[in-house]
Image: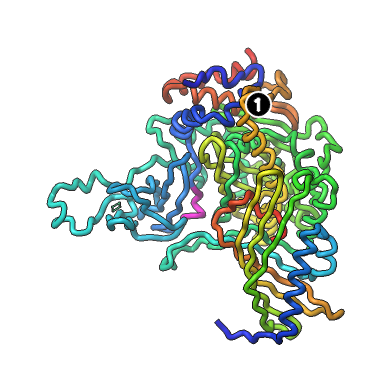
């Protein structure tokens, strides 16, 4: 039995180290977090046409996501209801239906079992075909981003994102929408799934140090942080955490991030030109953040960087391994030349051969694997930076930490983590809606 | 596929020696020397993974290529600068990388001073105590005979066989 209460101390900003290693905790996470949260599946731009499909994971479960004849999207567990073989072996494509390779049961785009070889002869009328469709998973989308949920009782995706949408809208909506450039790169890392999520949700502290060499070499607005030569000055940024643990760290006006020279200038120009449009389309308050660099995670395992323009899902594969899916992400209305520059910059920084990506993974793997030692695993993780400095953000309704560097979003992520591990169902989670801020604000 | 003309035995050996020299230079961490002496300024350096698709699927409109590397000279220069910075702790202690280059074929290129060079590579990369990683890929190169008579790389397309990156990342000389 896992004593969930002992894993996270929200008020004191610490977590037990064994959350990166323990198999029982991991099992609980698959049930209570991956079994109940909204998990990223795909984007409209990847499956635009009827019959387009793509295969991904929800936690450790493989799913197929399919564009339906009526334009809607459905997702199914990728196994055959006969003897359980995989139904779809391609990663993406366009199909009229899916036929299992084992005995040939054929499923429609809507997952229905349409035909069974020699059905009359071998089954007579035993088979209840209408109950043997591929098992469907609940899906919803926000601004073209599709997420799936195993829990029918979960709040809607919109409610799950909640006040955090205020920050999503800035780039998902501000200039006419975003799109993923696929297919995703895929890589296996030997780390716990939370190590990259916490890093992306709220770690501006490591940027100047972990990435010192990369920043020094690349230049651009983030380059000044190289080797901790400079601390971002007061007012340089903020950190945000929200109801369900989604968070973002913002470095103001650092949008071109690691793009220097002509490409950096092209990005800076785009942001400057579009800021007034964002103000008109959304609000002045949101436009203030447009053109900044965002490091962010959507609970539990979906991260993105805006400015370095990567979009990632960290799929768990046991307590100490993950599979990373990485896309480049751009604003739909950017000129093609800028999209290309952004994509190349993403590959250079956070792609599978990315300079910064490889810096990060080394830390994430050691943070995980050292816990094989019971004395090391018995320790605690510290995320106390800026403890006591945060307050409610009157503009967005979230909690805000008023500095570029701090660990506000770490604390918010692990507050939600503990809440999901403890709550017995979504009714209990919803009952906490009015009081989730109390512990974080120590009131 | 159009017929390609094989080069003379002499040129074949010369290209082979250039590839061997290149890999030794990289193994010895002489990245700047490699960039300055063996790489053309108009270099295109790609590493491409392929998404898995059904053979008969010609209706899906999404891209199939999954680039890991898409670099020009300036980008390679920045990667070399990263290693030269003295701050790159991920390669300190140093990594050890050994390329095995086989199945070499050399053909006359589209331009008279260029050669099309196909090879297979198996690369073993060791880092830290326990990480030994093996990568298998093809290289489709174009090497150019420059004004000084030397061969320099002007295009490399690394054709990666594995669909996922099993060895952590592709952030090494492929
Ligand atoms: S397992 Fe799929 S048809 Fe038998
Ligand atoms: Fe990082």
Q: Quadrant of residue A88?
A: bottom left
Whether residue A251 is visible to the viewer of this picture, yes or no, is: yes
Tell me if A36 is positioned left or right of B92 in this view. left
Q: Find ligand 2 in the image and state its quadrant.
A: top right
Q: Position of residue B80 (x, y in %)?
A: 80, 56
Nearest the viewer among A229 and A307 is A229
At numbered mark 1, what does the secondary structure look like: helix, strand or loop?
Answer: helix
What residue is pinned by disc 1?
A376
Q: Where does the magenta region start and end?
A: A42-48
A104 in the magenta segment: no
Q: Please, is residue A23 above or below residue A281 in the view? A: above
Q: Quadrant of residue A17?
A: top right
Q: Which residue: 48% across, 39% down? A: A59
Q: Which residue: 35% across, 43% down? A: A136
Q: Position of residue A38 (x, y in %)?
A: 48, 36
Q: Please, is residue B58 above or below residue A117 in the view? A: below
């Amino acid at each position: 039995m896992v004593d969930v209460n002992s894993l996270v101390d929200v008020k004191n900003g610490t977590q037990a180290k064994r959350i990166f290693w323990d198999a029982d905790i991991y099992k609980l996470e698959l049930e209570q977090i991956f079994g109940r949260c909204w998990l990223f599946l795909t984007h409209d731009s990847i499956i635009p046409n009827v019959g387009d499909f793509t295969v991904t994971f929800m936690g450790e479960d493989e799913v197929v996501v399919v564009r339906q004849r009526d334009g809607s999207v459905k997702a199914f567990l990728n196994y055959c209801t006969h003897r359980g073989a995989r139904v779809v072996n391609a990663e993406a494509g366009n199909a009229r239906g899916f036929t299992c390779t084992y005995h040939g049961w054929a499923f429609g785009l809507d997952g229905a079992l349409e035909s069974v070889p020699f059905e009359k002869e071998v089954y007579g009328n035993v088979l209840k075909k209408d109950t043997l469709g591929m098992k469907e998973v609940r899906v919803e989308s926000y601004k073209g981003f599709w997420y799936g949920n195993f829990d029918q009782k979960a709040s809607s995706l919109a409610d799950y994102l909640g006040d955090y949408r205020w920050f999503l809208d800035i780039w998902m909506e501000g200039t006419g929408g975003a799109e993923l450039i696929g297919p995703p790169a895929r890589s296996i890392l030997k780390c716990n799934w939370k190590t990259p999520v916490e890093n992306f949700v709220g770690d501006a502290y490591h940027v100047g140090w972990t990435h010192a060499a990369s920043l020094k070499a690349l230049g651009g607005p983030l380059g000044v942080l190289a080797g901790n030569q400079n601390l971002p000055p007061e007012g340089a940024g903020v950190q945000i955490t929200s109801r369900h643990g989604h968070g973002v760290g913002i470095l103001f006006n650092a949008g071109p991030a690691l793009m220097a020279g002509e490409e950096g200038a092209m990005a800076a120009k785009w942001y400057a030109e579009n800021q007034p449009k964002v103000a008109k389309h959304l609000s002045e308050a949101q436009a203030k953040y447009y053109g900044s660099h965002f490091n962010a995670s959507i609970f539990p395992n979906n991260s993105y960087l805006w400015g370095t323009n990567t979009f990632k899902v960290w799929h768990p594969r046991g307590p100490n391994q993950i599979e990373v899916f990485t896309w480049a992400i751009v604003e739909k209305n950017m000129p093609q030349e800028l999209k290309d520059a952004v994509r190349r910059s993403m590959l250079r920084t956070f792609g599978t051969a990315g300079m910064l990506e490889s810096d990060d993974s080394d830390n994430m793997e050691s943070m995980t694997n050292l816990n094989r030692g019971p004395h090391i695993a018995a320790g605690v993780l510290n995320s106390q930076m800026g403890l006591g400095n945060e307050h409610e953000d009157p503009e967005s309704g979230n909690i805000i930490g008023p500095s570029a560097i701090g660990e506000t979003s770490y604390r918010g992520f692990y507050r939600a983590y503990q809440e999901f591990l403890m709550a017995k169902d979504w009714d209990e989670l919803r009952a906490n809606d009015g009081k989730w801020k109390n512990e974080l604000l120590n009131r | 596929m159009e017929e390609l003309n094989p080069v003379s035995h002499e040129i074949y050996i010369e290209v082979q020696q250039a590839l061997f020299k290149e890999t030794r230079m990289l193994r010895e961490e002489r990245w700047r020397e490699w960039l300055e002496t063996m790489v053309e300024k108009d270099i295109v350096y790609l590493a491409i993974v392929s998404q898995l698709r059904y053979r008969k699927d010609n209706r899906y409109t999404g891209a199939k290529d999954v680039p890991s590397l898409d670099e020009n000279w300036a980008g390679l220069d920045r990667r070399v600068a990263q290693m030269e910075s003295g701050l790159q702790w991920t390669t300190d202690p140093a990594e050890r990388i050994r390329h095995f280059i086989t199945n070499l074929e050399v053909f006359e290129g589209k331009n008279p001073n260029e050669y099309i060079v196909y090879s297979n590579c198996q690369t073993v990369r060791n880092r830290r105590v326990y990480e030994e990683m093996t990568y298998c890929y093809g290289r489709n190169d174009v090497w150019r005979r420059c004004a000084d008579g030397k061969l320099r790389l002007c295009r490399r397309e690394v054709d990666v066989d594995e669909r996922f990156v099993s060895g952590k990342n592709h952030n090494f000389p492929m």
